[in-house]
Image (tube, coloured by chain):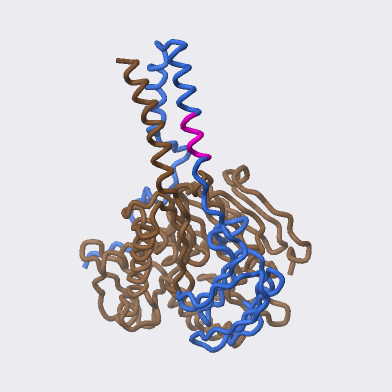
Amino acid sequence: MEFNSQPATRNPQLVVPRNSQPATICEAGLSLLKETFKEITIYDWALFVALILLSLSGLFLVKGLALSGNTATIEVNGKLIYRLSLNEDKTVEVHGPVGVTRIEVKAGKIRITDSPCPNKLCIRQGWIERGAIICLPNRVVVTIGGDTMGEVDAISG
Amino acid sequence: MKRLLFLALNLALILSTFSCNWRKDETYRKSEFLLDTIVTITVVSDSEKKAGNAMDKAFAEIKRIGKLINFFSPDSEISAINRNAGISPVALSPDTYTLLERATEVSTETGGAFDMTVGVVVNLYDFHKKIRPSDALIREKLPLVNFRDLMLNQDKQTAFLKRKGMTVDAGGIAKGYAADRAIEILKSEGIKAALVAVAGDIRAYGLKPGGTPWRVGIRDPRGQSMDDIIATLELRDMAISTSGDYERFFIETGKRYHHLIDPKTGYPAGGVMGVTIVGPLGVYTDSLATALFISGIDKGLKIAGTLGYDALMIDKTGKIHMTDTLKNKITLKPRMETNKNK
């Protein structure tokens, strides 16, 4: 039987090439632009600037959806159970696979006050104003704001 | 001709600006409990339906990988290898084989600091009940730890553990691999930017709406909560993984016993609190984070340098050590003195 437990050669994917800057499509486009701009008149420039201004005005005509940081969602096992306003003080309970998790909203903040999990990490996290509290054993995720995590998009650790 | 091209460029500019405004890019986020942890996928898309479909497919892929490599499920391919230890080789699906091959590469490259067969010793510790095994028991089981005794046959796509009693566990590499696979799925679904976080193993590509890059925090190993971070960095088409002595541990007579067991000694590796690795593929950052933790500061930084990865290592006194390649990419945060040395 032919076994090759040890890789004979180093997998090239394991080694990160140094200073590997892939040539981009932008570079190709830039050289084409340079060529184009060589033979144009002042009128062309006027037209060009006018069109750019027109284009940019389009950006301000469309209003983006404001992200709301003043709501919290409570999910159990990936299912949305509650969407709460942080402006209204209240306490809710959700049922997870281990038992009942109690969640409190007060003065724009949210916390887990009671949990059936063994290590109580979710309770120890205390009040949050942004980001999320995750209780792994009871499958509960409390998230603030629909779209914003605050300073970072994720935490490695 | 040149003039025509110039006008065409202008026209394209106008059209692109207005077409962008018909459908605005939004960020969509969804979490599921998979691989015994929480997986969060964030995507940027101009359509909620498209985003939802792509995320569902990515979650399904992670679920599929989980079934293949679940150490605790008798139906997994990993369990089949363990059941047949010392008996016969087991035919594997491409994913499981690839995963074991990648793990073996990292084990070889790090002199066995990362070893998927270390489970027989790790499982002697009960971190929940705060029980550690006797020295005699560790000595008895340690000979069953050796990645070189996991025989892979590339032609037949089989794996075979040479001796009875040996086990292989993909737990230290599967999360990074799952993040890689999820990213591949999202790319193939036409998603222009995404971040996949399989617990602390994260991979991201593209830019957020507004053109800003994804930003990831590194957890403070002695922080008050999981939200306490010591540094942030931008993640541009890269993966990041962290291994720390705070994930599963207990403290006995002032000594911390954690789950990152040195495969050569059978005892928790000393000298390091946390290691973070940045590189192109999650499958490698995941396993290298563990390998560098076991290797210690000097050896660890050397391995990262040789392979071209960015690494941040925090020693037992709380001091931060970094590869030169990381220094201008990272923003360190002021830390509470109390978190530094506990």
Quadrant into which the C terminus of chain B falls: bottom right
Q: Classify A112 as above or below B218.
A: below
User: Is-magenta flag for residue B5?
Assistant: no
Q: Give the range drawn in magenta.
A: A54-60
Residue that protrudes farthest toward the right in the picture: B337
* Residue occupying image coordinates x 74% and y 65%: B339
Residue nearest the viewer, comparing B69 with A87:
A87
The part of the image, by quadrant, that contains residue A120 is bottom right
Quadrant into which the N terminus of chain B falls: top left
* Residue occupying image coordinates x 42% and y 73%: B34
Residue nearest the viewer, comparing B204 with B80:
B204
Q: Classify B159 as above or below B130.
A: above
The part of the image, by quadrant, that contains residue B231 is bottom right
The chain painted blue is A
Q: Give the overall secondary structure of the magenta segment.
A: helix
Specify whether residue A116 is in view.
yes
Could you tell me residue B251's position as x and y percent?
68, 79
Could you tell me residue A19's position as x and y percent?
48, 37
* Residue occupying image coordinates x 62% and y 55%: A151
Could you tell me residue B120's position as x and y percent?
46, 80
Image colour for chain B is brown
Residue nearest the viewer, comparing B107 with A76:
A76
Could you tell me residue B87's position as x and y percent?
27, 81
Specify whether residue B135 is in view.
no
* Residue occupying image coordinates x 43% and y 54%: B281
Total of numbered circles in the picture? 0
Residue nearest the viewer, comparing A86 with B313:
A86
